[in-house]
Image: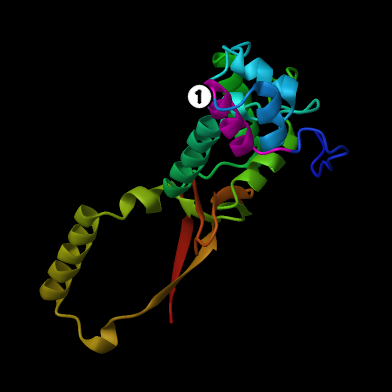
Amino acid sequence: MVRNYKRKTDRANWSEEQMKLAILAVENKELSIRKAAVVFGVPKYSLNRRVQGKLKSLSAEEKHKNILGRYRAILTHDQEKELEDHIINMDQAFYGLSINDIRAIVYDYCQKNNIKNNFNSDNKMAGRDFVAGFMKRHPKLSLRRPESVSVNRVFGLNKTSVNLYFDNLETVLDKHNFKPHEIFNCDESGLTCVHKPVKVVAPKGKRCVSSVTRAVNVVKQQPF
């Protein structure tokens, strides 16, 4: 599927609401199929198929959709909403998903749920065009470069550890009775094992996007 597909025909140029109204008019015996097709501007044969129940395998909502050409939606609206929510939840947990992560998740989801698709079975990933279309359909998401954060910093910053830190600080100050000129401000310098993260998909408008890594910093402290 091309990323910027341009429609080449005016066929099926009707809305779901038009088809829904035409079906209701026929089912309520207000209009004939031929008359309803003219009044609401929908194809007569498409209207007839839906009224006669030849699309029984479709849900009530899907019966009104105008589908034309080779391109079909792989995931339903609800399934894509679940994927969007999962992406946002992973970002909030500091484990933002990259484009390739999303491609692998979608492929695996389709395989486990027997959803027809044309994805590449060799690399076991959904196509980049699918992700490009998904991002357009969900404009609240964007591709961001996250700030790398050590897992120790994420899980170490909690109420218990912070209280313990200040308790220890108070004990040391009381024990040694340090004077102000004996207290130094130290700056961290050294090597870090924190990774350089790839871009991840995160909600638009979020000021800071972080990505966790399992790493420990090697730090040298220099007083000044």
- Give the x, y percent position of residue 180: 24, 87
Q: Is residue 59 left or right of residue 116?
A: left
Say what secondary structure mark 1 lies in.
Answer: loop
Identified by mark 1, the residue type is: Asn
Residue beneath disc 1: 28
With respect to residue 99, does 121 lie above or below? above
Number of residues whose C-alpha sits closer than 10 Å to that of mark 1, classed few (under 14), some (14–19) or many (20 or more): few
Q: Residue at x 20, y 86 (%)?
A: 179
Pick whichever, 94 or 135, lies toward us: 135
Q: Is residue 215 left or right of residue 31?
A: left
Pick whichever, 212 or 208, lies toward us: 208
Q: Residue at x 64, y 23 (%)?
A: 32
Pick whichever, 102 or 147, lies toward us: 102
Read off the magenta span.
14-29
- Could you tell me what secondary structure mostly forms the magenta stretch? helix
Q: Is residue 19 visible?
A: yes
